[in-house]
Image (spheres, rainbow, N blue to C red):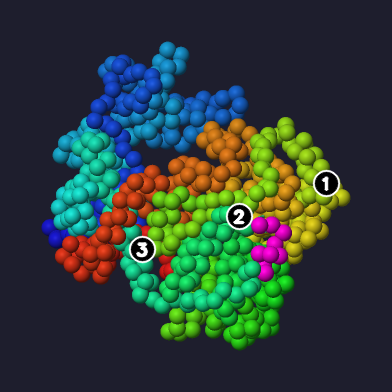
Amino acid sequence: MAVVDFGTQVQFLKSVGPARARALARLGIHTVGDLLAHYPRRYFDRSSCTPMRALAGGCEATVQGEVLTCGQRRTRRGGSVQTVTMGDDTGVVFCIWFNQPHILKQFRTGLKVMASGRPQRHQGHWQLVHPDYEIMAPAADREDEGGHLHTGRMVPVYGLTAGIGQHWLRALIDQALTRVGDQAPETLPEDVLRRRGLMPRRRALRQIHFPAADADRQEARRRLVYEELFLVQVLMGLRKLVRQQEVGITLEKPGTLTRDLVRSLPFALTGAQRRVLAEILVDMRSGHAMHRLLQGDVGSGKTLVAFIAALFVIEQGYQGLLLAPTEVLARQHGHTLAALAAPLRVTVETLTGSTPAARRRAVLRGAAAGEIDLLVGTHAVIQEDVHLPRLGLSVVDEQHRFGVRQRGRTSSAGGGPLPHVLVMSATPIPRSLALTLYGDLDLSVIDELPSGRRPITTKLVDAKGEQAMWEACRAEVAAGRQVYVIYPVIEETEGSDLKAATAECERLRAEVFPGLEVGLLHGRMKASDKDAAMGAFREGRTQILVATTVIEVGVDVPNATAMVIHHPERFGLAQLHQLRGRIGRGSAASTCWLMCDRFVGQESYDRIRFFAAHTDGFALAEQDLRLRGPGDAWGVRQHGAPGFRLANPLRDRDLVQACREDARALLENDPDLSGADAAVVRRALEEGYARLAPFQAG
Ligand code: ADP
Ligand code: MG
């Protein structure tokens, strides 16, 4: 047999031909190492099957038996119910599915099946509703064909793709473990393993796939999670070390711009805003470039803090740069900041994809000549040929698109002191996650909302309540206020969704708000049309704005006091929070209506009710993470940052802390990882084991 190691292509394993290799590639599995890192999504505990006669209500059970009958019937409300009965030597169990006719294609009388679920008593028999099930291949009973992998133990359940079956993949992973598992390279220093009581990598790999018992699975998971978190912390620590060697722009004497601005504001800065500004000033005077994450809930006043930070450098003759994630937001920031800057005689210019060419050239010239103090733009546009010879601060507004952090140092004067970088995030991230995603940055949190904010009332509305809701919206408009109507077009490429949003806009114009001005804003509009729609709403020329999620990011119209959200079940909690944060920005009371009924399904309904009952962004973010994990909750994966395979920085927050300490200790002793202890870590990093390396900060 050919020699196989972690780097070997999977085709060289037994039973993998070209077709299967292509299917595995769709799962991101190219090498044997990838295969072993394809961890189970969950497990069936088949170490003990319950005889059907001995079933009891309340707790999860696994039964094994033969299919006796399968069939389906229609329900009165037009749905269908699929029933598969199975029996063993002791009794019978009914497996039930609702509206899943395709399920029946898989069952046939006489097949051996294993099913897990919570038994319920129904009309004198036990039933399992939507059980986890697995049809046992005939060979699975035979020990020599891998039958021991599928029964009588904790059985791994893998994510699959077309052409890859559960049994086959299990056997393949077992084969790989047997052939190379013992050579699994270690990634953690000996001393960390010992102190933290972690098992060696080779043992962890076997136990995560085929645990001897649940306790072993937990220990294996803890070890592999530790690895993921630790390597990321080392990487972040290394980046920090590099920065500490660099010379940053240092601020000398304070100027007068900041004082003038603060005096001119109609309100006082909050305590949190002042504390954060003090932290920024300390950085700016330290001699090194600042790399700081500014976190704060929606409406906590981050933009103002960023502007004052820019004034710190502008008043000493430097330039500032603000990068926004979207065009709408860039224009919004440009607008707000220009208004604040005008009385101070500070020049603010905005540059986006739709800036006319002549204007663009003029702005670029002004920037290069040092005549523009603060340049605002979208990431995409500014990346290119902008030259700011006196750049002192880059503010990178990430909103909640984690993992897209951009270079914040566009064209610093080559070789000179480096400009400061401030990253703003609008989603309150729990600390353990912030330390993971942004572990190389220092953290500032605005944990206080400006006073005088009236709370937002959030209401669930079903079809019956709809008329009353629109009536309330008309009353808001009659009182001089404005209304957002949000329609979920999550991917702006989804044509049918967009049609629905546009049709809804027409209907609102014709039937619900006749005589009022209703604007429309969605991501597929031309930039100039978007700008016009936003401008009309900001200036009160439209009273109602029908918008898709483009509105979510940072739009600030304090006169808007009402929001209707259609299909809230299609948004995550963090996203709903961003949306709702568009209202409640002025001194008038605001209302948010969520149009949904119970038919969205229990899970969604519970999520929406949780949202309606909570306004604190941190509570919502934590719940979102708990429910969906960081990847899905905030699109970390969608936006190109490879997420963790096992770690969930929220659930594993204790480990985040421990890993941080260990990484720091390692780097203190051995900052370039050249010692013997650190050799395994260096190799792991070189081979790309640190799966979360999304940023090109600096
Ligand atoms: P964020 O960017 O954190 O969501 P913004 O900076 O957009 O919040 O601020 C929201 C609104 O609150 C803006 O209209 C801003 O002018 C106002 N604001 C900022 N700081 C204060 C403060 N200290 N007191 C009252 N209003 C404030
Ligand atoms: Mg803002």
How far is mark 3 from mark 1, CA to CA? 52 Å
- Which range is magenta? 260-268
Residue 270: mark: 2
Total labels drawn: 3
How far is mark 2 from mark 3, CA to CA? 32 Å
Q: Along the horizontal axis of the image, is 382 left or right of 143?
A: right
Which residue appears at 66% of the width and 39% of the height?
A: 458
Q: Earlier in the sequence, mark 2 or mark 3?
A: 3
Q: Return the residue found at the far left.
A: 1
Beta carbon at label 2 within 8 Å of ligand 1: yes
**Which residue is disc 3 drawn over?**
236
Which residue appears at 72% of the width and 54% of the height?
A: 558
Residue 166 x/y as whole percent: 31, 43
Residue 343 x/y as whole percent: 72, 72
Q: Quadrant of the N terminus?
A: bottom left
**Which residue is disc 1 drawn over?**
479
One can see residue 118 in this view = yes
Q: Earlier in the sequence, mark 1 or mark 2?
A: 2
Neighbours of disc 3 within 10 Å: few (<14), some (14-19), many (20+) = many
